[in-house]
Amino acid sequence: MRGSYRGGFRGVRGGFSGPGYSSGPGYPMRPPPFDIHIANDIFERVAEHDETQLTQKLEEIREVGSYKKDTALHGHTVADITVVMNTLPTFESVAALGGKISEELRVQKEALKCLVVSCVSRDFGCLLAGTNAQVRILITTLPSNAPNLEPDLHLSEKIMMTNHHAIRHAVWFEEASAQSPIKVA
């Protein structure tokens, strides 16, 4: 029997639903407050950024300067290495790179117990200093990244482009010396 005394037209279960046929309260309901305990179960955890890992991507590493050209003077114990980064080099990332290199050198030379390596950040990159020699790590980035550099956050654009030109000069020297009719022994 339809439309009996309980539930209206369709009975107790399954009546009309929709905008005009709501069985809820006639006033808008305020959503419950955000509960962090319920959200922990729903949202997956994201690992925090670990500052100890080096997140910079290196494009190229080249030896430049007088050690590359075999024209080093006697007593001049500073070698130059240029590192080209894919990403924009910040002061912190350069210090982390130098620290990681010096730590790896300490681990490799720990058996000899004669090498003390320290890393100091400089405006050109960083300087690794040992007991008998020093290595300047000249940091640069791809020339296409130069317009994106911020002066307060990244290394100086002028110094990085000078470091990039050191790579070009070393490549030019290699090509010119390979084609020269006069070879220096």
Image (cartoon, rainbow, N blue to C red):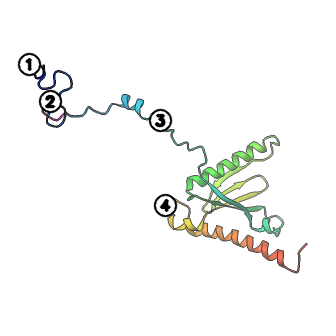
Q: Position of residue 148 (x, y in %)?
A: 50, 64
Q: Position of residue 44 (x, y in %)?
A: 46, 35
Going by the image, does 97 lie left or right of 108? left
At label 1, the amino acid type is: Tyr
At label 2, the amino acid type is: Pro
Q: What numbered label is drawn on residue 152? A: 4
Q: Is residue 42 above or below residue 154?
A: above
Q: CA distance from mark 1 to mark 2?
A: 22 Å
Most foreground residue, 185 or 6: 6
At label 4, the amino acid type is: Asp
Q: Earlier in the sequence, mark 4 or mark 3?
A: 3
User: Which residues are the magenta region?
Assistant: 23-29
Q: Quadrant of the C terminus?
A: bottom right
The nearer-to-camera label among 1 and 4 is: 1
Q: Which residue is mark 3?
A: 45
Going by the image, does 54 lie left or right of 81? left
**Crowd rating for badge 4 (residues with CA inside 10 Å; few <14, some 14–19, many 20+):** few
Q: Which residue is mark 1?
A: 5
Say which quarter of the image contains residue 89.
Answer: bottom right
Say which quarter of the image contains residue 143.
Answer: bottom right
Most foreground residue, 171 or 68: 171
Q: Quadrant of the N terminus?
A: top left
